[in-house]
């Protein structure tokens, strides 16, 4: 086992060597901005290389064992993109004042465009970079998590026999998906943003449906593709409206303050509203949220990729990109859209949290958690957009920074949670096979044959329990990730979630309709504390609920390392808060980090949170902490907590949580049969019947329109064409009857034609 692990680690040597790539570029005289295009270019070239080489060499030992069916190649490429991203961030922080926001890399296609005045103008299709704190934040999140998820995927995908000889397709699509996110974030125009946006949509279809032989996976892929396309139709409409307003989609043009003031603000608000619908589809917000839970049919690394690094963050990035529009227009002119964004966020946050209450599938709990936490960010962005559009510039920057900080915290925690869930599911599968084969070897179930335990669900928390002692690394990662999502004080998500809730209530005190999202996100905080704690206790506390769970242990060497790294990144939220990261994030062109022990360092943040001079915000902070960190987890302990098996103990930093849950359950234990049997619970289990309504809509409306279109095509379009065809054939036959082949007949027709023409001319003259 030791020799095997050593050989596995040796495969990482060429990957780690890629860290030196920025140094090589610097030695060659290139600057960071000149090398940034490689963040997109490297995955673009790696994608076909993995696909072609893998197809030609699948089954070969060197391809399977040394290159992990392309996983090592993908990891090396993503290491290059990550190192270039870090270099770009360092350069941006050091040379902030003169580091250009835009740098054109390709200027390659020239074409003529007909303008409104009837004149032709020359336009150029170019690709450049747009560098600010927003793009760099989302880029780092994407590059960092794509690298770690790929690392995790090597251990997850290559040890599953059902993936043999097709993992090259997975890693190729993985790299292409990552490239789509990198390109979208770095693009300097809405046109290129849309191109990479659609590329991600295509890759999501391929990866969600990776197990296309399963009907459920194929259905989930189609559902995700079609639902997001609905939003994309509105996005295209919004972009066309922007083009009509500004004559360009380049950020340098559309974000110019003078140009924004020159256009009609009502039309601009409508255009941004259309684009927001596209963001709603991409980030799975109400009412275009139905695709995300079903996307769990893809492999777990895909779930982590979509939920933490790429797809769902794309919608948030698009809304964040609208900030200059709200900042430059007249006061209150775009406040309505900001309110709508916040309300959609609040409704989605509360709805998703309620549905998560009754989920027993480990990945689906996390899926609804993603919807809910993204909704928090939408609410925060809505608050920031309202504040800046109403002249509260300082408050707007704080709210904007808090929303982006929560994007970062959520991505780190959710990436870790999905990989931890994948680790649990992976080992549950292995343990299930061990138990299955053992039973067959003992000869106890020979009559059952292949039907033995066929329907065992390795993702169901009802089959888990007691894993805290058997999977300590995974349990630790999931505990820290859950604490961040809940908002346990001092851990990652706490700082940003408190900021979002506080800023939502600040706006509500100025705009009463904002009480709707403000109250909803506050209630969601309590619900988050319950369902995230419920997930952890059902999985790791108590006694194993099945024989399979009792046989589980951590065994795959590739999986734990990303979990450890992300655990420290999540715990590092305290450090980022002390650096006053919200100020930097809230000022895309002028923000800065504070000294950790300086005037606005960690003591300022602690005082601002726990001893706020504003009495209302002081009380709001503690209400939020009590609801999310005490009430929700305590109820979960009373319902789902429990001591481990006799003789089983976990690590000290985990064991105290398990012990506390056991004491709470023994002291306050109660059952929830009344709720479980209620109509509300059944409705929540059916996802509030949204899927049924969507299916009915598709069957009755879309299918009806499709049938009408088919009839119209057959009767009208095809009928008209066939009428023209038959008429022309009849005419041709009559004309052909005149072609006798006799020179005499042709001379007579020519003479008659000449005379006819002469008579006509005579009449005209």
Image: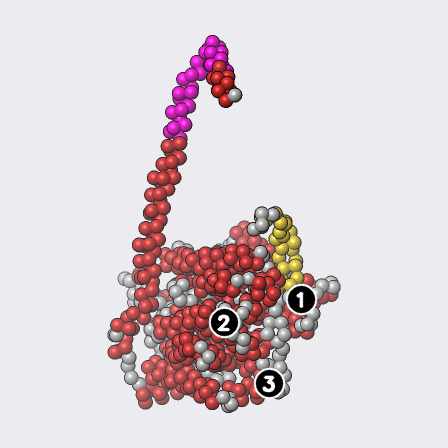
Identify the element where label 3 is drawn. loop
Residue 686's place in the image compared with 495, above or below, is: above
Residue at 47% in and 9% down = 744
Q: Which residue is mark 3?
A: 601
In-front residue for pair 224/304: 224
In which quarter of the view is residue 141 placed?
bottom right
In-front residue for pair 76/205: 205
In-front residue for pair 551/542: 542
Would you say 575 lies left or right of 659 here? right
Q: Position of residue 345 (x, y in %)?
A: 43, 71
Q: Which residue is mark 2?
A: 332
Pointer 3 with pointer 2, Cβ within 8 A: no
Q: Position of residue 216 (x, y in %)?
A: 37, 59
Q: Position of residue 420 (x, y in %)?
A: 46, 72
Stretch in magenta: 725-754
In which quarter of the view is residue 140 placed?
bottom right
Q: Nearer the viewer, mark 1 or mark 2?
A: 2
In which quarter of the view is residue 189 placed?
bottom right
What whole-number distance in Å separates the C-alpha atoms at marks 1 and 2?
31 Å
**Would you say residue 144 is visible in this rendering?**
no
Q: Position of residue 662 (x, y in %)?
A: 36, 86
What whole-number distance in Å separates the C-alpha atoms at marks 3 and 2?
34 Å
- Which numbered disc flags the more N-terminal residue, 1 or 3? 1
What whole-number distance in Å separates the C-alpha atoms at marks 1 and 3?
28 Å
- The image's mark for residue 100 is 1
Would you say 185 lies left or right of 655 here? right
Identify the element where label 2 is drawn. loop
Q: In terms of secondary structure, what is the magenta stretch mainly?
A: helix
């Amino acid at each position: 086992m030791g020799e095997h692990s050593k050989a596995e680690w040796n495969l990482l040597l060429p990957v780690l060597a890629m860290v030196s790539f920025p140094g090589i570029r610097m030695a060659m005289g290139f600057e960071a901005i000149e090398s940034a295009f490689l963040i997109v270019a490297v995955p673009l070239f790696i994608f076909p290389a993995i696909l072609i080489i893998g197809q030609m060499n699948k089954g070969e030992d060197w391809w399977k064992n040394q290159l992990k069916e392309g996983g090592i190649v993908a990891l090396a490429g993503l290491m290059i993109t990550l190192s270039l991203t870090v270099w770009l961030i360092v350069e941006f922080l050091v040379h902030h004042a003169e580091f250009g926001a835009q740098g054109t890399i390709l200027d390659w296609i020239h074409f003529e465009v007909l303008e409104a005045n009837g004149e032709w103008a020359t336009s150029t299709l170019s690709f450049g970079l747009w560098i600010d704190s927003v793009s760099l934040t989302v880029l780092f999140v994407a590059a960092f998590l794509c690298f770690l998820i790929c690392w995790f995927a090597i251990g997850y995908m290559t040890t599953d026999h059902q993936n043999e000889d097709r993992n090259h397709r997975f890693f190729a699509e993985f790299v292409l998906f990552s490239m789509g996110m990198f390109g979208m974030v770095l693009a300097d125009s809405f046109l290129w943003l849309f191109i990479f946006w659609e590329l991600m949509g295509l890759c999501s279809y391929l990866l969600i449906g990776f197990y296309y032989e399963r009907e459920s996976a194929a259905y989930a892929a189609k559902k995700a593709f079609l639902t997001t396309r609905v939003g994309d139709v509105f996005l295209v409409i919004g972009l066309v409206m922007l083009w009509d307003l500004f004559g360009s989609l380049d950020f340098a043009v559309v974000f110019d303050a003078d140009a924004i003031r020159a256009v009609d603000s009502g039309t601009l608000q409508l255009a941004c509203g259309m684009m927001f619908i596209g963001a709603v589809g991409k980030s799975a917000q109400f009412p275009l949220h139905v695709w995300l839970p079903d996307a769990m049919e893809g492999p777990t690394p895909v779930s982590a990729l979509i939920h933490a690094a790429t797809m769902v963050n794309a919608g948030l990035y698009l809304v964040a990109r609208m900030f200059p529009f709200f900042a430059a227009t007249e006061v209150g002119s775009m406040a309505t859209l900001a309110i709508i964004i916040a309300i959609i966020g609040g409704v989605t946050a509360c709805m998703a949290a309620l549905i998560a209450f009754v989920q027993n599938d480990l990945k689906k709990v996390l899926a609804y958690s993603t919807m809910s936490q993204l909704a928090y960010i939408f609410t925060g962005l809505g608050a920031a957009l309202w504040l800046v559009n109403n002249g509260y510039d300082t408050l707007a920057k704080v709210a904007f920074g808090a929303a982006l900080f929560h994007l970062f915290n959520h991505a780190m925690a959710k990436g870790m949670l999905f990989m931890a869930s994948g680790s649990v599911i992976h080992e549950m599968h292995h343990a299930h096979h061990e138990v299955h084969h053992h039973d067959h070897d003992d000869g106890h179930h020979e009559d059952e044959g292949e039907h033995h335990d066929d329907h065992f669900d390795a993702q169901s928390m009802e089959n888990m329990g007691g894993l805290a002692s058997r999977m300590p690394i995974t349990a630790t990662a999931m505990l820290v990730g859950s604490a961040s999502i809940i908002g346990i004080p001092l851990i990652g998500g706490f700082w940003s979630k408190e900021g979002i809730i506080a800023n939502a209530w600040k706006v509500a005190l100025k705009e009463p309709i904002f009480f709707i999202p403000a109250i909803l996100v506050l209630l969601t905080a309590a619900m988050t504390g319950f369902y995230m704690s419920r997930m952890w206790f059902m999985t790791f506390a108590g006694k194993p609920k099945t024989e399979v769970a009792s046989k589980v242990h951590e065994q795959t060497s590739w999986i734990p390392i990303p979990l450890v790294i992300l655990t420290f990144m999540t715990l590092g939220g305290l450090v980022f808060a002390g650096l006053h990261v919200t100020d930097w994030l809230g000022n895309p062109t002028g923000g800065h980090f504070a000294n950790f022990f300086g005037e606005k360092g960690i003591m300022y943040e602690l005082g601002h949170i726990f001893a706020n001079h504003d009495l209302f915000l002081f009380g709001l902070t503690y209400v939020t902490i009590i609801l999310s960190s005490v009430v929700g987890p305590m109820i979960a302990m009373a319902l789902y907590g429990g001591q481990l098996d006799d003789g089983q103990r976990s690590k000290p930093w985990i064991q105290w949580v398990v012990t506390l849950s056991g004491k709470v359950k023994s002291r306050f234990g109660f059952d929830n049969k009344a709720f479980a049997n209620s109509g509300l619970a059944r409705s929540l289990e059916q996802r509030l019947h949204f899927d049924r309504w969507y299916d009915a809509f598709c069957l009755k409306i879309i299918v009806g329109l499709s049938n009408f279109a088919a009839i119209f095509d057959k009767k009208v379009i095809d009928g008209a064409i066939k009428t023209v065809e038959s008429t022309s054939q009849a005419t041709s036959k009559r004309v052909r009857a005149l072609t006798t082949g006799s020179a005499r007949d042709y001379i007579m027709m020519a003479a008659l034609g000449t005379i006819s023409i002469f008579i006509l001319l005579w009449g005209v003259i």
